[in-house]
Image (cartoon, helix red, strand yellow):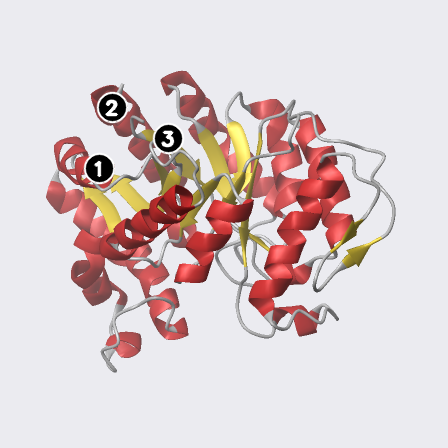
Amino acid sequence: MRLTFGLVLDFSTPARTIGEQIDRYRGVIAAADRYGFDSITMGEGYSTRPDFGHTPAPFLVLAALAPLTKMRLGTGVTLLPAWHPLKLAYDTAVLDQLTGGRLIFGAGLGPPGLGRRFGNNTEPTGKFADDMLAALRALWGGQNGFTGKRLTVEGAIGTRPVQPQGPPIWVGGSVQASAERAATLGDGYIGSTSQSFEQVAQMGERYRSALRSRGKDAGSAVVASNRLTLLAETEAEAHEIAEEYVGEVLAFYARRGAQMPKDSNTASKAAAALFHEMDESRCLVGTPDRVIERAKKYEAAGVTHILARLVPHDIPAEHALRTVELLGKHVLPEFR
């Protein structure tokens, strides 16, 4: 499979409402449509204070974006412990209808304790996730309820997805069990922003190996990777902008300890220093030629979808638009 490119958009910010964010991104979305980008995805997050990053209601935001684009629309990822399986089955079926069958359903576990916040008993979380995905498959396919090891759902859903087997499921995670879950219950693997190139490559190979062990086709395996992406006409300008905005996202993940280097000083480093330390392993920053060079490494490692996270930490929209234009004019044609 040739490498394809999609967008990742951040919607939560203390500076404006989500409706204002959608208006802010209209030009970016229109440009991505013109150049043939594959998808728009977004994360799900439940901050306890106004902050930058993922939205707590990605399905609502995707529904609002559906009339604005021809691209596929998805989550990267939905946090399963925050949901009841029946509600999740209904909402994803409705959203698949609203998008005309363009929905991609990314699935992950989220931070420890998330289920408790929503009143859900999700322990052990991995087995809960397995049952959640199996329940979705059953309900999307028209079964009258579901009984698993951790979950029981009574009755069918009267609203069904447009896609015959339901939306494709891209499973996230950073351990062997995640790759096994993706191979057993999913249609692809999705790597997070905080994963290094080496971690993405390793998880992709684990996923393909798990597919082969189940007698499934590993040659067409979907492996997606979220990458902090910023292009400019010169390396110096791209790095100057990334030091502030990309660096702040890396600092957020460093404070959480999410798949970051185990150096005890990582969480205390300044945003600019973190960008320069992690640029090579977690970002696509630079001129089009430089980004092409890095993207080819991902393709050679078996990554099939790069999901370009364009608007980290409230970066001005004009920088995101320029990134889309440079990707569309110079980078995407190299992979067609």
Mark 1 is surrounded, within 10 Å at the Cα level, by few (under 14), some (14 to 19) or many (20 or more) other residues, namely many
Residue under label 1: 295
Asked if 150 appears above or below 67 in the picture, the reply is: below
Q: Nearer the viewer, residue 97 or 28?
A: 97
Horizontally, residue 28 falls left or right of residue 275, namely: right
Which quarter of the figure is the C terminus placed in? top left
| Residue at 56% over, 53% down | 44
Q: Is mark 2 on a helix, strand or loop?
A: helix
Of badges 3 and 2, nearer the viewer stands: 3
Q: Which amino acid does label 3 sit on?
A: Ser
Find residue 167 and report its horizontal and vertical position in percent: 60, 34
Horizontally, residue 25 falls left or right of residue 265, namely: right
Of badges 3 and 1, nearer the viewer stands: 3
First in sequence, mark 3 or 1: give its number.
3
Q: CB atoms at circles 1 and 2 under 8 Å apart? A: yes
Query: Does residue 107 appear anywhere in the picture?
Result: yes
Mark 2 is surrounded, within 10 Å at the Cα level, by few (under 14), some (14 to 19) or many (20 or more) other residues, namely some
Q: Nearer the viewer, residue 281 or 7?
A: 281
| Residue at 50% over, 53% down | 181
Q: Nearer the viewer, residue 142 or 196?
A: 142
Query: Does residue 47 appear anywhere in the picture?
Result: no
Which quarter of the figure is the N terminus placed in? top left
Residue at mark 1 to residue at mark 2: CA–CA distance: 9 Å
Q: Is mark 3 on a helix, strand or loop?
A: loop
Q: Count the numbered circles shown.
A: 3
Residue under label 3: 220
Residue under label 2: 335
Residue at mark 3 to residue at mark 1: CA–CA distance: 18 Å
Q: Which amino acid does label 1 sit on?
A: Ala
Snapshot quadrant of residue 166: top right
